[in-house]
Image (cartoon, helix red, strand yellow):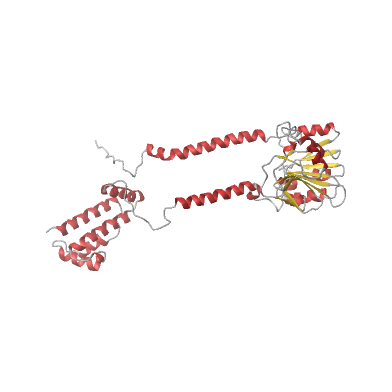
Amino acid sequence: MTTEATLPATSASPTTRQVWTRARGVALAVVLLLAAAVVIATIRSDTRHGTLDPRSADPKGSRAVAELLADRGVDTRVVTTLDEARAAAAENTTLLVASPDLLTHRQQSRLHSATAVSGGRTVLIAPGSWSIERLVPGVTADPATSLDSELSPDCTLPAAQRAGTADLGGVRYTTTHLNADECYPSERLATLLRVPEATGDGDSIVLGAPDILHNERLDEQGNASLALQLLGSRPHLVWYLPSLSDTSAANEDDERSFFDLLPSGWLWGTLQLFIAAAVAALWRARRLGPLVPEKLPVAIRASETVEGRARLYRKANARDRAAAALRSTTRTRLAPLVGVPVSQAHAPEALLPALSAHLHNHGDGQALHTLLFGPPPSDDTALIALADQLDALEREVRRP
């Protein structure tokens, strides 16, 4: 009965406990991130359902304002395609666009061409830089959004003066129109704009935030008054909810890239993270100057180093490197013994003649050349035999 020898564990073979100790921090961080993502997704899925939908009674819906308008004789109709929204634009109609940034550039241009000459009112809810300049030329969205919510009118627009303080904020706007009404300023930039048409009685209303239309905020401040005045100036209200299934958005050349879909705040935040990472890397860098030798904190036995390197060679199946290391070390040790300078230890024409002359019963020069400068062994057995032959040669040279 034969028993296979079990190699002892070394520093090159970490145990399961060591692997777990090193990886548990990363595993815990991944679990926490996944749990946070699930919680955030659950919360957002509840709060964003039916956002700005006049048929929704959810906190972020707008059913309350639609019913108040109905009590005042204003009928509300929901449309989800661009063609329906363009057809509804008329002098006696208010067209509300809930998410202008969902429209492509071509859709925005087509919608503007229909509303610019309709004589009605167009209300845009929180348009960003992607859409505002096409829907209302001459108006620009500021990249930095306002965190203020309760703002004062600070303008001469009658509807804003009657409503008083309201929950606006959000996107801030600048305009080149001299006759525009700039209301509810945040840091000197308006969060509500009224831009009249060049001809006729029509106008465009730009709101920086949708809060005054939400069910949960309608009874606060002057939100209800402002919403009813802005949306109830005409007997008909068409509520346009842009849909991703709208066929007018298909096969267009102005599709947005991934970066266009990201809010500007995320881009600025990512840039700040990159800068922080670069600063941290510079702070933690180890090679900003010349290398400084340091003493090892513990003494490592030479046998462990040899064993570790041997295991690495064996794992990589690098018999050629192992044989070259054995032959090079042997030649370096043999050269001083036979009177050859170490600098010429690896030159066959210098080492082999001196070695042959030193040996008494080993004068075969071809065998010495093959042993010290020959090809790499073909398998592990040949490598072991090579090591034994080199060891025997060194013992023979050292023999007095």
Q: How many marks?
A: 0
Residue located at (30% from left, 46% from top) = 298
The front one of 150 and 168 is 150
Q: On screen, 93 above or below 72?
A: below
Residue occupying the far bottom of the picture: 349
Q: Quadrant of the N terminus?
A: top left
Query: In the image, is 373 to the left or to the right of 14?
Result: left
The front one of 149 and 93 is 149
Query: In the image, is 169 to the left or to the right of 237?
Result: left
Picture coordinates of residue 94, whole percent (x, y): 82, 42
Picture coordinates of residue 147, whole percent (x, y): 66, 42
Q: Quadrant of the C terminus?
A: bottom left
Residue located at (81% from left, 32% from top) = 68
Residue located at (34% from left, 49% from top) = 312
Residue occupying the far left of the picture: 400
Picture coordinates of residue 24, whole percent (x, y): 44, 38
